[in-house]
Each structure stands twice: as structure tokens, then as C-alpha cells.
Image: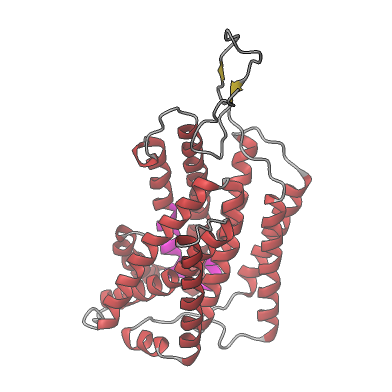
Amino acid sequence: MDMLSLLLHPVLVFVSSMIFGNMEAQILGIILSILGSFLISISLNLQKYTHIRLAMKQDPLPYYKSKLWWCGVLLMGIGELGNFAAYGFAPATLIAPLGCVAVIGSAAISVLFLKESLRASDVIGGTLAVTGTYLLVTFSPNVSQDITALKVERFVVSWQFLVYLVLEVIIFCVLLYLYKRRGVNHIVVLLLLVAMLASVAVISVKAVAGMITMTFKGDMQLTYAIFYVMAVAMVASCVFQVKFLNQAMQLYNATEVVPINYVFFTTSAILAGIIFYQEFRDAGLLNIFMFIFGCLLSFLGVFLIARNQEKSTFQEPYINFGEIPGMETVDKIQPNANSITYGTLLNE
């Protein structure tokens, strides 16, 4: 979600509204989301591979000086651009769960390019994820609303959003305290921080893009203060999302980060769509039940794919000292793929 996507988004929405109907626009949004999620899965694996390669060097350079890492960032930018555009064509509660494509794509990349074995749990998990996605698409809310500054202001002061915002701020501050002051860098803590920022990002991105779209249609929205408040919130939330997500990618394997991040992000985005934009306001009980059931199937499928997933292994060199005079034992230093430093020799 960058400034380029922000500039292109209203053009895409305006053109789609002229060419496509509501159903056709939602199909286009689904396609954009699937393509974007697949590119993001490639990006995450590239970034993790970069961290592992740097860890194997005795004097590793900062990751941001690696061309391969920047290739991963570029792919992530393109993927996020696709996801961002998708939010303009379909409700957030429909687009967010399609991120399971990133998990399935990551598993496929591991099998095809990293030569990992295809397990029965991968097949079952993929089937459940696809089934859940079908239910999500079928029973998602079919809403189409113009996002104006006055409407965003009304959403901001609604009691349900204010309660949600207070709870989110409290939880975010507690997690940030654990991370910064207590040094707790558990994957759940890091990705919960990402998910909470993602909730703000989904709300602000849709608001900013919607107001720019209305401006392109002739209804000026850029003179309202809420537009600039949402723009600042959008940029800040996206920047800190990248920070915490990259920290998680440095410490944990992509097969762990991707599924957990998917579940947290999807839940956060759905809550944002339901609470802020009230996308399920007129939905029937059957639609709500089947939508929740589709979410659970997708979550279960994702965790089956990730369960006991073997970490990506690379041909790691080791330093063999051979026979050293005066030493009774011969040992070798083997780099740890999850560490940023080499091991050390035991003091004899």
C-alpha cells in the first residue's frame, strides 16, 4: 500500500464503475487480490532467503544492502498494490480472507523450488482453504457504498467504533510495552502488532481511496480535515506494519509467519469492515453463519498446511578445521539458519 497505489486506485475504480457492473467489479477485485497475495508469498520467501544467506556470512551486511531483499520488497509492493486496488472493487470482508492464496502459494513454492515433499496435510489443508474461500466469496456481503468525508466522519464517532478503538489502543500499548521494554519478541506478539496496525490501515486506506474516487467523480472531498487525518493514519500504519513484519521474518521461518499473519490480518480486516463500514448491517443469519464457517475452514486449512512444516534448508557451508596440533578433538562450526551469527568454538 504505497503512494503509487494511492494515486492509481481512484482511476481504476472510476474506470471500473464506467465499464463494469457491481458483480463484474467484485470479480475483478477477487482476481486482483489473488494475484497480489501470490506475489506477496514469493516476496516473503525471497526476504527470508536473503536473511538466511546473510546469516551464513562471517561479516554479514545489513539486509537492506542486498539486491535480492529489494527484489522481494518490490514484489511485495506490487502485490500490495493489487490488494489495495481490490479493496476498491469489493468489500473488505470479501478481499481480506483471500490472503490464504499467499499461504497456498508459499507451500507450492516450497514444493516446486525448494524440493520439499508434498504431504497429505498440505493437500487436505489446501482443499479446506479453497472450500472456505468459495464460501467466503459466495456468502460475503454484496454491498456497494460511496465513501464520502461526511460518511467517514459519521463512522468515526459511532459508538461501536469508539469502543473498538479504545480496546485496540489498550491492547496495542500492552503489546508494545512487552516488545520494547521486556524484550518479548515472540511471533504472536509481533504479528498481533502487525494485525492491529492492519486494522487501522484497512479503515484509512478505504476511506482515503473512497474520498479520492468521489473527488474524481466531481464531488470534492479533499477540503475536509478527515481526509488528511486518514491519509496520515494510512501512511503511519503501513510503515510500522513493514517494520514489525520484517522483524518477524528475521526471527522466524516464512512458513510460520505467513499463516499466522494471514489469520491475524484477516480477522483484523473483517472486524474493521464490520465495525467501521458496517458491511454486514443488512446481511441475513444464513449469510453470516456461512461466512464465519468459511473463515474457520480457511483458518484450519492454513494451519494444516503450516503444521510441522519443515523449515527451508539450504546448502550451508561449514568451516572444517581439520586436525589442529595440541587439540584432542576435531570440531566444525556450523551456521544456524535462524541466527545472525556463527557458532563459537568450545573453550578447552
Quarter placement of the C terminus: top right
Quarter placement of the N terminus: bottom left
Instruction: Please say if 328 is above or below 36.
Output: above
Q: Nearer the viewer, residue 328 or 135?
A: 328
Instruction: Please say if 118 is above or below 192.
Output: above
Q: Nearer the viewer, residue 191 or 103?
A: 191
Q: Is residue 263 left or right of residue 54?
A: right
Image x and y of residue 206, in percent: 40, 73
Quadrant of the rendered image containing residue 323: top right
**Residue at horizontal 37 percent and vertical 34 percent from the top:** 61
Q: Is residue 290 left or right of residue 217?
A: right
Visible residue check, residue 219: no
Image x and y of residue 92, in percent: 50, 72
Image x and y of residue 181, in percent: 46, 62
Q: What span is in magenta?
A: 79-96
Q: Residue furthest right?
A: 120
Visible residue check, residue 299: yes
Instruction: Please say if 237 is above or below 80.
Output: below
Instruction: Please say if 93 is above or below 343.
Output: below
293 magenta-colored: no
Q: Nearer the viewer, residue 348 or 283?
A: 348
Magenta region, main secondary structure: helix
